[in-house]
């Protein structure tokens, strides 16, 4: 599949809303035409009054027609705006779904190489950043092509020389705008990168505020925030200098064309110009041409004002396509493998190794089997690859070589040192593991994870709200909450990365006892740990040394 | 009235920030007005010119000797054409530069506010919430000047001047125009703001909710995937998105309505002016050319009013951003009065009947705790998670002030210590390893910005990481990733320890120094830590001291905390064991 481009993405998305866009363009066209009619009425009324010296009273019906046209035109512009806005809403929703699907397919290990703040910025702000393009620019682009053509045609019927003025100035506009726009686009992309970097820089400094305070470094960090903001300003100004230039070019041409048309018509009406159609000009045609001249440029000006929408959307789309083009490593060799050879084997690895870009092979080749009900402890120096082995077993990383063969429809429970705590109640957090669990089951799981006492003390019990990063819970409590989720899930394979890392002795004992319970329930445990007490729990011991997994005799 | 008052209170601090750049803002608004009057002048004079020439041409054709001075209006037309272009470009550039300057001011100021919050307030804020506060909220506030202050002011000025100008020729037209346009102006600003207020306020909070849910999904992907609850979490995300889009749709409708009304308003005003001017012309009080000039000038009001509906419909977004930033400012701790001189040694600390009671907690985090630590002593504070150890560490490092009791450090009440001296003399290894998303060297130098490269290597040597860092292609410049994610938990812990070794404190607080480190490494670290701690006073915070867990070196005293209360029975003096180092 060819790589998706930013333009390709935007066009794909637009194609799904073609009907709404077409209707919006039609509404805009009719609204534009009504404006011409109003201008025609204006010129006609003036001419009737001044040239034909008709009494005002006889012209009243025309004024009434004009008055009736006004709300009709309003209705049409309203339709145009709301139609394209709806299209934009639908498109943004689609795009966000697509991105989330893709990120889910990439999996947690691949995501770890991204800054999650930048990434969520992309999913929220950059998807929002394409709004202007669909809600305004796309329809405006058509109007900018069609409406000036209409004005030109009307002008041509009145005075071909004036029409020629308009025609001559028109092609210069897209030319200049394209020249200016090209530079602006690149700059806009850079600016998006800058905004993402800036947000990463911020969240990082803010998260580390305690450390910065303790080292007395908040002033320096504040300075670095200013420097980063200043950099953002300087870069933004570079973008804007060009972006505004494109609209200034347009402004210049439209102003000059109006001036030229006004002076040409004026002199023509005075009879100073004795060539071309000038001597056929009347006050009506002259005034109409003058009134329509701004309408020739107005759609183009609106487009120019919306030009940054296009640049912003392309910039955002470009970054988003980087994400969407990130290949999914679902090479068939690894996914459509046969189940393990022996029927009681839950999962097996055969010659499986894991490679990290830039670091070479970090683990493997590993050949191991895990039977149902077994418990394995994985030891090794910090950084030796214990977590990688768990990720490999979980399928979060695909083996670069060899095979991972899980039993059919293998489900597993996972707990690492950074447990997920979602904003919501304790119950919401528990139900992540088992959406249909009953209240009793939740309490039982909490009891098993040794959180029962704490929950009983809380006035709202399991309905107590907790926040992101577990506000209200200590590190050990968060760890135990994650453990409670393990108990709740009925997954046969349980992968635990340092399950007792931040627990005190008593809780630790309770957790070990609880893990024992899990074992007796026939679950298969893989525990990466340094902790000797956990080893007693297991019947197998894998030691990782130099990337190799060695089976150590247990006992 | 009360509502307007509360609005004034909400925006006062931000208007004050704007006021500091008064000159730039004034000049920017003038440039806006200049652009508008150029456009108005261009259309009005052109209309006048064509009508005048047309009428003169008719007279000439009829054989009447008539003449028209053409150079002044011709020159005016050319002048307005150029001034409109130039002033517009300069105005936009100048005003955006101003706004970005304001944003840099605001961001820095806000970071300063955050840095002044105490640990408790810091912990309450959620990480992605802050990102929003720091960037989006302030970005939203940019609309204060460029969208909400200058354009309506310039439009109002234009309405008054235009009506005044028209009134010079046709008083009735001028008066009616003023009435109609002012009413319209009120609707396009206040009316639209009122219409969109609720939805645009909701929009901000829903965008924030979407952001933090997205972050949850990305950070917790491993567990969500494992439990197959990705879909459920996605549903929550989708529900928030739905609310968000609902608000956006409403706002879109209000904006479209405002725009349609604006078009109607200018059209109706033009029509009305033409009618009244025609009446005046019939009465012979104005010329035909002026009769055309007046409505054409009104037609140009589109430029002044066109941007108002969109800006004001979204007023609530700006308002709630300002409100939330105000809340943050309100939590800022007053900077304590401190002496400027360095009080000297901090080897000794005593806590006298200290209690800490968090407002929302059921029981005090620390209850009537007293202890005295003498130079060179090493205390182990032992307790479960939640026993009050971390609160104790925050008290001693002055990240928290006690609810009751006092703390004397080096003979001087803790609150009188100047911040710089306190940070130099008291070092803390926090339980959670916090690393910046920056290079190893940057992270190490947090502890001592002046540390040379040799110092860094030496510190890494002490935590047995030097040889590993040497194998990295980028050495000390290796990026550690968000929160040190590119390092293993144990490596990150050791980096945090190495960072500590770059300071020269009198008093050291170590919260679980060997958390996440395997036992052989912990033994190694313990030896070098022991050497570094010589001549310093130490407080260890540990879960337990037992034989099978790596124990920090050289403990002289032990204090067990249970639910914030010292357990006297378990307070052991290792008097005999005190190492004579």
Image (tube, rainbow, N blue to C red):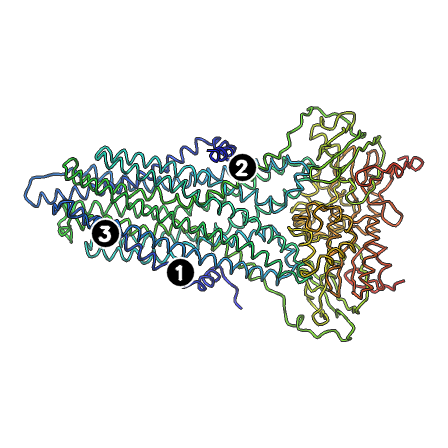
Residue B173: give x, y in percent of width and height: 24, 37
Residue A308: give x, y in percent of width and height: 43, 50
Do the residues marked 2 and 3 share a common chain? no
Q: Earlier in the sequence, mark 1 or mark 3?
A: 1
Residue B214: give x, y in percent of width and height: 59, 54
> How far is disc 1 from disc 3 in space, using C-alphas?
30 Å
User: Which is nearer the eye, A71 or B427?
Assistant: A71
Label 1 chain ID: A
Pointer 1 residue: A21
Residue A140 showing in the rendered view: no
Label 3 neighbourhood size at 10 Å, few (<14), some (14-19), many (20+)? few
Mark 3: secondary structure: helix
Instruction: Specify the quadrant of the image occupied by residue B404.
Output: top right
> How far is disc 2 from disc 1 in space, using C-alphas?
40 Å
Pointer 2 residue: B106
Left or right of residue B441: residue B292: left
């Amino acid at each position: 599949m060819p790589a998706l481009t930013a333009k390709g993405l935007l066009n794909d998305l637009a194609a799904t809303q073609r009907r709404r866009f077409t209707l919006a363009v039609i509404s805009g066209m009719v609204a534009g035409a009504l404006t011409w009619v109003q201008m025609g009425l204006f010129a006609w009324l003036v001419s009737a009054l001044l040239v034909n010296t008709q009494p005002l009273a006889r012209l009243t019906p025309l004024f009434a027609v004009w008055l009736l046209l006004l709300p009709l035109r309003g209705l049409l512009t309203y339709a145009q705006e709301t139609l394209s806005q709806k299209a934009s809403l639908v498109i943004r929703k689609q795009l966000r779904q697509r991105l989330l699907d893709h990120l889910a397919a990439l999996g947690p290990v691949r995501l770890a190489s991204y800054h999650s703040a930048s990434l969520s910025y992309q999913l929220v702000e950059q998807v929002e950043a394409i709004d202007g393009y669909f809600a305004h620019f796309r329809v405006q682009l058509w109007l900018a092509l069609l409406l000036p053509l209409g004005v030109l045609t009307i002008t041509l019927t009145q005075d071909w020389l004036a029409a020629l003025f308009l025609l001559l100035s028109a092609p210069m506009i897209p030319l200049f705008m394209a020249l200016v726009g090209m530079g602006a686009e690149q700059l806009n992309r850079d600016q998006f990168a800058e905004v993402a970097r800036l947000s990463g820089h911020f969240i990082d400094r803010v998260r580390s505020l305690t450390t910065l305070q303790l080292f007395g470094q908040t002033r320096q960090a504040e300075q670095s925030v200013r420097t980063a903001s200043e950099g953002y300003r300087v870069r933004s100004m570079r973008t804007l200098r060009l972006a505004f230039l494109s609209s200034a070019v347009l402004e210049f041409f439209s102003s000059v064309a109006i001036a030229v048309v006004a002076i040409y018509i004026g002199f023509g009406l005075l009879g100073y110009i004795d060539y071309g159609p000038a001597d056929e000009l009347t006050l009506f045609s002259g005034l109409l041409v003058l009134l329509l001249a701004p309408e020739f440029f107005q759609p183009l000006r609106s487009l120019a004002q919306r030009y940054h929408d296009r640049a912003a959307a392309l910039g955002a789309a470009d970054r988003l396509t980087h994400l969407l083009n990130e290949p999914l490593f679902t090479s068939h060799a690894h996914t459509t493998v046969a189940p393990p050879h022996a029927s009681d084997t839950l999962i097996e690895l055969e010659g499986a190794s894991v490679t990290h870009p830039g670091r070479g092979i970090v683990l493997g080749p590993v050949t191991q089997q895990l039977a149902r009900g077994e418990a394995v402890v994985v030891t090794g120096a910090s950084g030796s690859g214990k977590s990688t082995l768990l990720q490999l077993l979980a399928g979060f990383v695909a083996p670069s070589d060899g095979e991972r063969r899980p039993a059919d429809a293998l489900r597993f429970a996972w707990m690492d040192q950074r447990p997920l705590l979602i904003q919501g109640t304790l119950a919401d957090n528990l139900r992540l593991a088992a959406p249909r669990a009953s209240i009793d089951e939740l309490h039982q799981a909490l009891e098993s994870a040794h959180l029962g006492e704490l929950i009983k003390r809380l006035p709202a019990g399991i309905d107590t709200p907790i926040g992101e990063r577990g506000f209200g819970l200590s590190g050990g409590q968060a760890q135990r909450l994650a453990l409670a989720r393990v108990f709740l899930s009925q997954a046969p394979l349980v992968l635990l990365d340092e399950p007792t890392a931040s627990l005190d002795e008593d809780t630790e004992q309770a957790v070990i006892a609880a893990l024992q319970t899990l074992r007796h329930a026939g679950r298969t445990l893989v525990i990466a740990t340094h902790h000797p007490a956990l080893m007693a729990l297991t019947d197998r011991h894998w030691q990782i040394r130099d990337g190799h997994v060695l089976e150590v005799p247990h006992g | 009235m009360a509502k307007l008052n509360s609005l004034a209170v909400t925006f006062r601090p931000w208007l004050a920030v704007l006021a500091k750049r008064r000159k730039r803002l004034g000049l920017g608004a003038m440039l806006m007005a200049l652009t508008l009057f150029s456009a108005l002048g261009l259309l009005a004079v052109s209309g006048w010119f064509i009508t005048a020439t047309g009428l003169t041409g008719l007279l000439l054709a009829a054989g009447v000797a008539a003449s028209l001075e053409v150079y002044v209006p011709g020159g005016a037309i050319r002048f307005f054409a150029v001034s409109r272009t130039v002033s517009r470009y300069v105005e936009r550039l100048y005003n955006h530069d101003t706004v970005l300057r304001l944003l840099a001011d605001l961001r820095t100021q806000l970071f300063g506010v955050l840095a002044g919050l105490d640990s408790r307030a810091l912990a309450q804020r959620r990480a992605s919430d802050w990102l929003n506060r720091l960037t989006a909220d302030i970005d939203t506030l940019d609309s204060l000047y460029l969208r909400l202050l200058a354009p309506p002011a310039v439009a109002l000025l234009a309405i008054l001047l235009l009506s005044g100008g028209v009134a010079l020729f046709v008083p009735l037209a001028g008066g009616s125009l003023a009435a109609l346009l002012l009413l319209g102006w009120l609707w396009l600003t206040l009316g639209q703001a009122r219409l969109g207020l609720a939805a645009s306020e909701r929009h901000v909070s829903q965008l924030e909710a979407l952001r933090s849910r997205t972050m949850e999904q990305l950070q917790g992907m491993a567990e969500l995937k494992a439990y197959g609850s990705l879909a459920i979490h996605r549903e929550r995300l989708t529900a928030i998105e739905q609310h968000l889009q609902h608000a956006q749709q409403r706002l879109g409708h209000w904006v479209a309505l405002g725009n349609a009304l604006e078009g109607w308003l200018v059209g109706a005003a033009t029509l009305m002016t033409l009618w009244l001017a025609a009446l005046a012309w019939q009465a012979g009080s104005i010329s035909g050319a002026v009769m055309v000039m007046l409505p054409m000038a009104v037609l140009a009001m589109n430029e002044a009013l066109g941007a108002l509906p969109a800006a004001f419909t979204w007023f609530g977004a700006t308002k709630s951003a300002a409100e939330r930033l105000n809340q943050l400012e309100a939590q800022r701790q007053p900077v304590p009065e401190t002496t400027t001189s360095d009080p000297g040694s901090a080897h000794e600390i005593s806590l006298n009947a200290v209690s800490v009671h968090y407002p929302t907690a059921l029981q005090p985090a620390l209850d009537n705790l007293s202890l005295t630590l003498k130079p060179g002593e090493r205390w182990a504070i032992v307790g479960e998670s939640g026993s009050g150890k971390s609160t104790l560490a925050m008290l001693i490092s002055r990240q928290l002030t006690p609810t009751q009791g006092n703390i004397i450090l080096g003979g001087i009440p803790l609150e009188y210590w100047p911040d710089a001296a306190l940070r130099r003399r008291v070092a803390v290894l926090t339980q959670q390893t916090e690393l910046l998303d920056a290079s190893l060297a940057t992270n190490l130098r947090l502890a001592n910005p002046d540390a040379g490269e040799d110092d860094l290597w030496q510190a890494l040597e002490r935590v047995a990481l030097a040889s590993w860092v040497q194998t990295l292609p980028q050495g000390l410049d290796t990026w550690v990733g968000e929160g040190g994610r590119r390092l293993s938990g144990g490596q990150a812990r050791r980096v945090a320890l190495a960072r500590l070794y770059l300071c020269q404190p009198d008093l050291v607080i170590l919260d679980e120094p060997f958390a996440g480190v395997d036992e052989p490494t912990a033994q190694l670290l313990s030896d070098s830590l022991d050497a570094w701690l010589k001549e310093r006073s130490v407080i260890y915070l540990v879960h337990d001291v037992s034989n099978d867990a790596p124990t920090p070196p050289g403990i002289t005293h032990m204090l067990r905390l249970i639910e914030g209360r010292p357990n006297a029975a378990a307070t052991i003096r290792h008097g005999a064991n005190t190492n004579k180092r």
